[in-house]
Image (tube, helix red, strand yellow):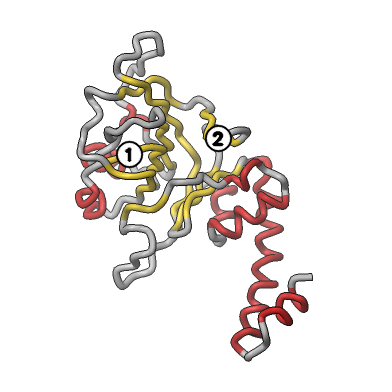
Amino acid sequence: MSSAVRALRPFASCDIGDALVKLKYPFGGFLDGISMWSPERQGHLGGKLTSATIGEAVTVKMVDAKDESSPKSPIHFADANEQGKIMYIQQPKDMYSACFGGLMGLRSKTLGAAGVVVDGKFRDVQEIQELGFPLYARGISILGSNTFTRASEINIPLQFKGDLWIHPGDILVGDHDGVVVVPPSLVDQVVALCSERKEIDDKTMTALKGGMPMGEALKKFRK
């Protein structure tokens, strides 16, 4: 586990996103539209508290299967998973098939991956949940990938939206609120801001539990 991952582990995606907004990082690093599907669906705890998923990014660019001009990956992309890392898979926009499924989830877990973020659709949701493998995605599809998409390039920078990019080695943090990406260069500043905010939030929470009005609490502790 890298020092950056250890430093960010105590903090929630919301806290990290707020810190990145203060640092004027594009979109606060928020991967809009992507939510938790495994080990349980976002917001459904199932009687247990699921910890955050965190790790350095391994990136995969998928292209339309009909695309003959883009490079071809020399290996199956699932074999590119690495111990303790999170694979970010970018599917062509508006593709209605899945680009990740149960067998790939099994391979990812076997290789010790910390999780997968699918910027697109996946399938075999129950299989992946039964594996207990963390997975975040835009949605699901019953259709497999073979006739629709293929892996093109691995570990290249990928544009999420506007000026927000995901680079190999960036830190991905996912939990029930969503997924955020943190560049290594900003980790120390993010940790400092999150630590400061946590202390303020703890004081605010204590005051609210004691009956202090919301407006008064915010004015007192969030100046």
What percent of the width, then of the height, locates residue 184? Answer: 62, 41
Mark 1–mark 2 CB contact (< 8 Å) = no
What residue is pinned by disc 2? 161
SS under mark 1: strand
Q: Closer to the camera, 148 or 106?
A: 148
Compare marks 1 and 2 and give the one earlier in the sequence.
1
What percent of the width, then of the height, locates residue 207? Answer: 66, 85
Drawn side of residue 176 relative to residue 48, left or right: right
Disc ID at residue 121: 1
Which quadrant of the view contains residue 137? top left
Q: Residue placed farthest to the bottom in the image?
A: 210
Relative height, residue 71 to residue 178 (above, below): above
Relative height, residue 96 to residue 117 (above, below): above
| Residue at x 34% of width, y 67% of height | 45
Identify the amino acid type marked 1.
Lys
| Residue at x 28% of width, y 55% of height | 132
Identify the amino acid type marked 2.
Lys
What percent of the width, then of the height, locates residue 37? Answer: 33, 52
- Quadrant showing the C terminus: bottom right
Drawn side of residue 124 relative to residue 112, left or right: left
Within 10 Å of the Cα at label 2, are there few (<14), some (14-19), or many (20+) other Cα atoms?
A: few
